[in-house]
Amino acid sequence: MSKTLIINTHQAYPFSEGKLNKSLVEKADECLSRLGYEIKHTDMVSDYDIDEEIDKHIWADSLILQIPVNWMSVPWPYKKYMDEVYTSGIDGRLSDGDGRSTQDSSSQYGSGGKLKGKKYMFSLTLNAPLQAFNESGQYLFQGKSIDDLFFHMHMNFRFFGMEALETFVCTDVMKNPQVQADFERYEKHLQKCFSALG
């Protein structure tokens, strides 16, 4: 049986209670359970134990990160989680430091990951509309893709040796939400990405 860790990184804001992200976590849980996955959860509103979280990453074959994009990145509680959990894990559990040593610094930086063969997937919710990306005439992102925006996050998981699954994104969630269509797209996306893994 394949094993997946789902992390809901949402932090509540006055204008966003987190219902969409919670619902997407529930959809992922339902879909992957039907595919025969064993699932564990973490969220940013509950207390967590650092060593237990590292163990969950080692246990899982795949990781889904449910992320409401906040100021072009992750909400601060998840950044805190990363600083605590992932920094603790570079002791040889998630990676051997940065892959280099003082005895031999010739190895490439970031090549010490211990989670090789494991997959991760970003499921993002954004206020930005889809057309804000991949078009050079767009004011803010200037032709960059959503994965360009999250390049730094991709590198965090590459640092551990993990491989990316295709990113899923719900766009325009505040001004022009298409929730039911997003749910339908998400189920298809999960089936496409995770049927082959299970």
Image (cartoon, rainbow, N blue to C red):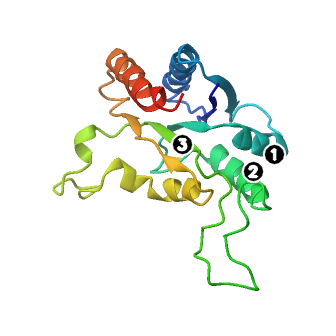
Q: Quarter of the image holding residue 168?
A: top left
In the displayed image of the protein, which residue is found farthest to the left?
137
Of pointers 2 and 1, the one earlier in the residue sequence: 1
Which amino acid type is shown beneath numbered disc 2?
A: Val
Which amino acid type is shown beneath numbered disc 3?
A: Tyr
Circle 3 or circle 1, nearest the eye: 3
Q: Residue 85 carries which label?
A: 2
Gap in angstroms between the C-alphas marked 2 and 1: 5 Å
Q: Which of 155/72 is in front? A: 155
Residue drawn 62% across the image and 38% down it: 61
User: Which quadrant of the figure contains the C terminus?
Assistant: top right
Tag 2 secondary structure: helix
Q: In this view, does 190 lie above or below 158?
A: above
Residue at label 1?
50
Q: In this view, does 90 lie to the left or right of 3?
A: right
User: Which quadrant of the figure contains the N terminus?
Assistant: top right
Which amino acid type is shown beneath numbered disc 1?
A: Ile
Q: Residue 146 carries which label?
A: none
Tag 1 secondary structure: helix
Of pointers 2 and 3, the one earlier in the residue sequence: 2
Across and down, in percent, residue 52 comes to 82, 40
Residue drawn 49% across the image and 30% down it: 15
Look at the numbered discs 3 and 1 and tell me whether their residues touch, using CB distance below 8 Å. no
Dot 3: few (<14), some (14–19), or many (≥20) neighbours within 10 Å?
Answer: many
Look at the numbered discs 2 and 1 and tell me whether their residues touch, using CB distance below 8 Å. yes
Circle 2 or circle 3, nearest the eye: 3
